[in-house]
Image: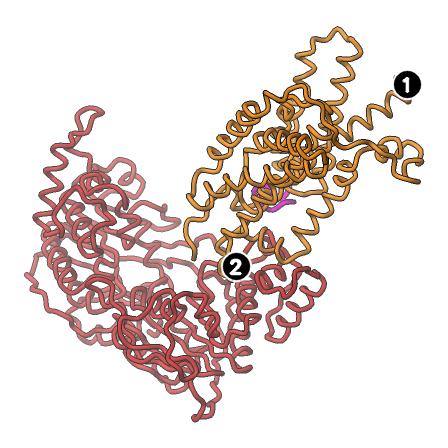
Amino acid sequence: MSPELILALLAATVQAGTPILYATLGEIISERAGVLNLGVEGIMALSSFAGFLGCHLTGSAWLGLAAGGLAGALLAGLHGVVCQVFLGNQVVSGLALTIFGVGLCNFLGTPYIGQATDGFHQFAVPLLADLPILGRIFFRQDALVYLSFLMPALVWFLLWRTSFGLGLRAAGEMPAAASAAGLNPQRLRFLGVLLGGLLCGLGGAYLSLAHTNLWTTGLSGGRGWVAVALVIFAFWRPGRAVAGAYLFGGVMAFQLRLQASGTNVPSSLLLMLPYVLTVLVLVLSAARAQSARRRGILGRKSAAPAALGVNIESVG
Amino acid sequence: MDIAPHTPDVGPVDVLPLVRLAGVTKRFGQVLANDDISLSIMPGRIKALLGENGAGKSTLMAMLAGRFEPDAGHIEVAGKPVAFASSRQAIAAGIGMVYQHFMLVEDMSVAENVLLGQAGGFFLDPAQMRATVGELAARFGLGIDPAARVGDLSMGERQRVEILKLLHRKSRVLIFDEPTAVLTPGETAALFDALRSMSAQGKAIVFISHKLEEVLSVADEIAVLRRGRIEGEFLAADVTSPADLARRMVGRDVLLDVHRDPVPPGPLVLAVRDLSLQGANLSGPALLDHVSFDLRQGEVLAVVGVAGNGQQQLVETVCGLSRPESGQVELLGHGWDEFHKYHDWDGALAWVPEDRAGLATCRSLDLTDNMLLTTREGFSRGMWLDRARARTAAREIVREHNVQPGRIGLQAWQLSGGNLQKFVLGRELRRRPRLLVAEQPTQGLDISATEAVWQRLLEARKSMGVLLVTGDLAEALQLADRILVLYRGRVMGLFPASDSGQVERIGALMAGLS
């Protein structure tokens, strides 16, 4: 492989990793608040369509992005209502959300298949783009990629450096303690779900507004599930989500290149690669958590929020 | 553990009480949990509420903490009557509780836990948060690292975090519910220092406990609670005889007289020899210390003592939940191992546990299923249960023991405590045991249910030996043929209930004075 090819592959890695990064960060917020949202795949699917439609109708990529984020928040809000108001099972509700989101995307999106979108375009950042190697990989991208560079720090700051984040994490760890402190854990959880859905929605909108310029259904292609797995890989920490997202982005970009180069390996096998990696990553994360536990480093079950997936039954 | 006695400073008399309870009464169904209670909680004083389990301490404090409202009487804060509709209002009024189960987020730091929901602005400054909490801790002598993760802390340190939460909220009344239950002796001493430091700075401290020596060492004032009533209030400095306090706590007033037929003693059913148990805390005192006694068919042996002096360990050993560490336990002439491996389900050992709604029954099973929990004999054909016969038997128990309402389709939680207890007792007696272990059998029961249970136990002793574990001296004196006093796992005395000279000394024995 020539150096030029490698640089192109790395740049494609960043592009492929970006939607996963948004979705992973969104799911981290939701799970930190104690709500497991398995509907990420459905949210990304629906907001990829909402992003396309918003852009298609208004002609503005930014309004398309807003539509995608809004659709994500709305769909996640449905999950919030089911789990926080009616105390529904979070796993079942999340799975239903995925089926619903993907189905709705296919239903609404089919008439528009093949329509071109005038979404986000790549532009070089002055000065930074001229950096050797790094400039080529990171700074000749589109606006959403640049925004995603800031996102992990923003999410970290929100969760660990604001009183809202402190309350949100308490609602995910021990809602009774949050309640005893005079906070409203239900409300905090709901806000966490909405915010998480918004970020997942941005990830979905990226797929139709920047990743491709031609609308088609099925853009999410399992990325939502990868994001759910990456939250575990990242130990629920925004910084580690970056590494995970780009790792997956790299595998996705690599298998595309490999297919394009006309290799003899069946394309079905190549398409499996990201998901094989998902399984491997989950096994490795579990093994690492176990060995850390054995050596007494973490000093607790896992890094998962203690009340993750547990609904708050009564206000105490 | 030896703690130097605390000499209370006598505060000014004209200070207004921070909180005053006037004639507070609370009733749950038939049971009067709190009966006309009047108390004043003064700033700068440590008030101990001394009482056995079920004496009504928790109910009283739950009303102060706003968890429920009194049926009669009222609560005043700083001279003004208040009605708390929620715990939030009680906190706002300056009343804070340290519960036995901590409300802490384990994965957060001490500072984050203390300032949760309290931090002023939107943005957090961790360094400043640690400084704030560190200063507060230092001011009240609560040594703790504000940056430490709560999950890594000992129980005593976690308790300090709970106290800091209240102090940060400027609570003026701090209520501690059995605070030493989870502490080591060293931590207990540190807690008492902190309590004194807080009271010296004008906080009012309420210390709920059944541990006599702790109350005497830390409290300025002591209120004794028994069966929902204040039995007496003392200045700790005026208490000359801990035995008197112990007697007041467990009482010996006769509520009702039960008829006792003399029963000739039968064969030996339980023999305990030199039973000792160290438990998990290897450096602490032994939980059971060379306990020896016999129990024959035809007698009730009452084990009395302040709760937590080894009664639970004794019962668990006899009933087969824990293996004797050293010494022998013989049941119906068999060794402990042999008996608990092979004994017949019926006609042997029956246990009426203290926790009748948790250990004795499953709350959402109906009465037939609850009966089958301990008796399958006669109701099974191969691997199938004969439910029709089981229902008949359950109906018999309900009728014979007058369980109200008399429908066997009801689930356990739908019965009142007294009726559930009558059912449990009926279920166990139906198995015709030869040894019955009854733990606090009338705790929380109204008078008629108490009488029914007492009659059954006296009746039962004709065909079995009854080991009665009770914290209620009146109950022991009514039922027992012999009385065994436990203190810190040691047998302080074992004598016939008719020996009036010894009976007089029970209070002293329970307080560990021989």
Rounded to the nearest angstrom, the CA distance separating label 2 from label 1 is 58 Å
In the rendered structure, the colour chosen for chain A is orange
User: Are both tags, 2 and 1, on one chain?
Assistant: yes
Which sits in the foreground, A212 or A177?
A: A212
Which sits in the foreground, B180 or B114?
A: B114
Scheme by which the image is coloured = by chain
Q: Is residue B191 above or below residue A138?
A: below
Q: Which residue is mark 2?
A: A183
Residue at horizontal 39 percent and vertical 85 percent from the top: B235
Q: Is residue A90 magenta?
A: no
- Main SS class of the magenta portion in the image: loop
| Helix, strand or loop under label 1 | loop
Q: Is residue B282 left or right of residue B51?
A: right
Q: Is residue A101 above or below residue B281?
A: above
Q: Position of residue B300 (x, y in %)?
A: 17, 58
Q: Position of residue A276 (x, y in %)?
A: 65, 21
Quarter of the figure with residue B304 = bottom left
Q: Position of residue A167 (x, y in %)?
A: 58, 55
Q: Tell me, yes or no, if residue B93 can be seen here.
A: yes
Q: Which residue is mark 1?
A: A2
Q: Chain of mark 1?
A: A
| Helix, strand or loop under label 2 | loop
Q: Is residue B323 left or right of residue A99?
A: left
Quarter of the figure with residue B46 = bottom left
**Magenta segment range?**
A294-303
Quarter of the figure with residue B112 = bottom right
Q: Please state which amino acid type lies under the numbered disc 2.
A: Leu
In the rendered structure, the colour chosen for chain B is red
Which sits in the foreground, B221 or A41?
A: A41
Q: Position of residue B13 (x, y in %)?
A: 43, 93
